[in-house]
Amino acid sequence: MSGKPLRAGGSAARIAVIAGDGIGKEVTPESIKAIRAVIDSKNQSARRQIEFIEFDWGADKFLREGVTLPAGAVEMLANDFDAILFGALGDPRVPSNQHAADILLGLRFKLDLFVNARPVELFHDRLTPLRDRSTNDVRFMVFRENTEGLYVGVGGFFKKDTADEIAVQEDVNSRKGVERIIRHAFDYARSNRLKRVCMSDKSNAMTFAHDLWQRVFKQVRQEYPEIESRHLYIDTLAMEVVRDPRQFDVIVTCNLFGDIISDLGAQLAGGLGLAPSGNIHPGRTSLFEPVHGSAPNIAGKGIANPLGSILTAGMMLDFLGWKSESESLRNAVRSTLQENFVTPDLGGDKGTVEVGDWIAARVGSR
Ligand SMILES: NC(=O)c1ccc[n+]([C@@H]2O[C@H](COP(=O)([O-])OP(=O)(O)OC[C@H]3O[C@@H](n4cnc5c(N)ncnc54)[C@H](O)[C@@H]3O)[C@@H](O)[C@H]2O)c1
């Protein structure tokens, strides 16, 4: 591998591409095409340099060679790349899903990608299942803690496979972990001139783990007096997000609750085919992926919606500091939805590549 890349904000970037399995291999090339098109559309002096290097990590390699995340991969990604563009992992031939756990959870934990950023934005009124809601009503950001909580895999069985079996799963919350995600939410609100941050937990029932969330939240919010901060229990938040999503600008919560509430949000904005996400550690190599999985039921048919992946590419460009390119991609996605040039999941009859070509043509020359 070559030397250290320019870091976020520079004019050149190196991107590791892990398309993965199933439709990950179909949508990721459309994102790369869109990024190349938007960069090419700028005049020569404003043009950024971007290099994509593809890695074939996924089910095929695992089945062929028994390798999931190769030795040294994490260090190589951290040292030599600015960001990772990821597709999806999951294959019916690997029922244990071991390769997906090793690669995706491995990268999230080992690169310490503690922010899971899941923007919820409705691009066209017809895409929300909520009655009488429009694009102005559904626009908020969910920050899910991404490295702790119930997902760390601490626990065990006692008397497994007997009638007296006990299963224990520990919920791990560190002060450092809770503080950095809450602070990130407030910093994001401040830098994007958003007025409201809502922290959600279940401190009435989870009286140790979420008592820590309560105390840290009360401490951190004092540093952001201009931002209206609020707490809702997660069950109340789920109801309120559906009843009136206009109440929310930024939501911050733990790993498990963030997983669930961000999927609820994705559905309010048009569903899985449109939802982007970032796994981020500010200032370090971060990983960007559409929310959807490998969709084996439609893989190989050429009908997967590439827009979630293209919006994900937009988030990645934003992370690199390339705001105008990112905005161009989002605007192109908005146009395709307005003109209903879409794949079957959104009621259209276009193919993955057709939509990708349309976006690339819309953002600039190909
Ligand atoms: N981050 C990831 O890589 C990730 C996330 C979720 C699931 N998975 C894996 O993906 C595999 C399938 O999981 P699943 O079926 O529960 O979830 P999925 O997201 O793959 O599919 C759920 C449903 O949504 C549809 N869908 C998803 N993305 C679409 C798109 N871009 N365009 C059109 N339709 C789309 C699928 O056809 C399917 O009907 C499993 O192996 C699972 O473990 C991986």
Image: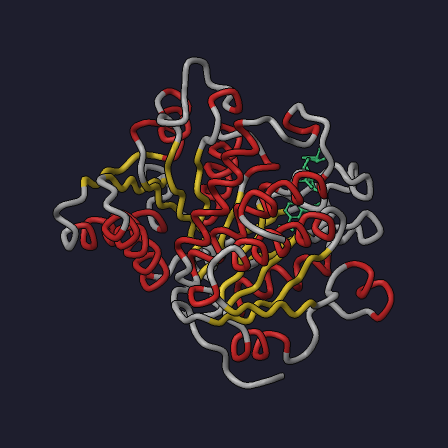
Quadrant of the rendered image containing residue 193: top left
Q: Nearer the viewer, residue 170 or 224?
A: 224
User: Is residue 3 found left or right of 249 in the rendered image?
Assistant: right
Relative vertical location of residue 169 with respect to residue 50 in this rendering, above or below: above
The quarter of the rendered structure image containing the N terminus is bottom right
User: Is residue 55 found left or right of 360 in the rendered image?
Assistant: right
Return the x and y of residue 78 as percentages of the image width and height: 52, 75
Splitting the image into four quadrants, where does ligand 1 fall? top right
Q: Nearer the viewer, residue 364 or 269?
A: 364
Relative vertical location of residue 282 with respect to residue 200 in this rendering, above or below: below
Q: Residue at x 38, y 34 (%)?
A: 139
Relative vertical location of residue 228 with respect to residue 146 in this rendering, above or below: above
Query: Does any portion of residue 321 appear in the rendered image?
Result: yes
Q: Nearer the viewer, residue 329 or 131?
A: 329
Outermost residue, top side: 132
Q: Nearer the viewer, residue 211 or 105?
A: 105
Number of numbered callouts drawn: 0
Q: Residue at x 72, y 27 (%)?
A: 349
